[in-house]
Amino acid sequence: MQLRFSENFSTWMKHQPRLYQIMDFLDISEWHTSIDMLKYEHRVLVTDSSLHVDELSTQRITGLGNFRQLAGVPICGSSQPDTNGIINIHNVLTKAYWNISLKNIRPVVHELNTSKKGSEKSSNGKEVNSYAVIIPQMIWICLRDDYVVKYSGETCSWREKFKPEDSITLRGANGMELEEMEQKFANSISKIKPPCKLFKLNDNGKLSIINIESTDQQLELLSLKQMFKQAFNMVNTINSSVSSSSNNINNNNIEVSSIHSTLIDKVPNSYAIYLNEHAKYHRIPLPNYGHPPPPVISLFNILYFSLN
């Protein structure tokens, strides 16, 4: 009887060149790379802001590089944001949403002796149905497959010292594995004494050291997940303060514009006008008009996907 495997494994592999190509994409050597490469400056931390990836020139308006929106669908994309960028783009989308949902809103008078739930009376005695306008949930999906940390106020990643333009990817890692390794990476950097240096890429393609001591920002080290949580907590703090201030206004003399203007004044109205026309053109259903509830931000889901 002939053997099922008539040749050894090495000989069989020589006849399967495709498997070597697959194994190249499954290289997990970066999973076990020592942090000593950063300690002895074989690798360095390079800021994302110095890589000049904003080819769409949206950093000045939205605070995010390469910010774009899919036509007809509320799906947006951008390059790697920092804490301020996350807060800014959240306020941009929220402000535009309120400008649409609160357009032509009519103030109503709350009566204590109303018999119908969900029904209110205006100043002329007519019943007006008001519906709560709910902020849609925002889900951030991260497509990066390398280490990203926030160090001294800058979002950065580690690169080869002599190849700072090339990212160092973690092949074969799923979302949870990348999240755990990134947290261990941040903890290992915090143990380096003296603190590791931070570099930026100049226009001529050379690295230069950023003087961390001269910056006013407090030296901090956060993983990407911690950075997003920090931004969400800051957004919740801003919204809670706006909500508490708006609750002090008399219900009989509510002016939606005054409440709404306290959210974010720096967002240009042109973006809200564009979004309104965009919704009309693509026939996107708008929410029912009514007094908005206090702004509530639910827990955002941070998903990591590895693109290999």
Image (spheres, rainbow, N blue to C red):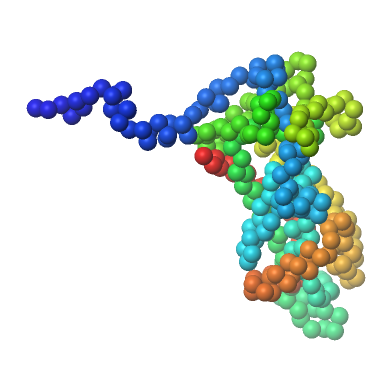
Image coords of residue 72 (percent x, y): 63, 66
- Residue at 79% in and 60% down: 95
Where residue 34 sits, quadrant-wise, is: top right
Where residue 94 sits, quadrant-wise, is: bottom right
- Residue at 76% in and 30% down: 206
Comparing 68 with 124, the one in front is 68
Comparing 217 with 207, the one in front is 207
Where residue 76 sits, quadrant-wise, is: bottom right
- Asked if residue 162 is positioned above or below residue 204 in the image, the reply reads above
Image coords of residue 306 (percent x, y): 55, 40
- Asked if residue 6 is positioned above or below residue 141 in the image, the reply reads above
Image coords of residue 60 (percent x, y): 82, 51
- Residue at 71% in and 44% down: 53
- Residue at 56% in and 26% down: 30
Q: Residue furthest front?
A: 204
Q: Residue furthest left?
A: 1
Image coords of residue 48 (percent x, y): 73, 38
Q: Is residue 240 left or right of residue 302?
A: right
Q: Quadrant of the N terminus?
A: top left
Q: Is residue 37 visible?
A: yes
Comparing 163 with 215, the one in front is 163
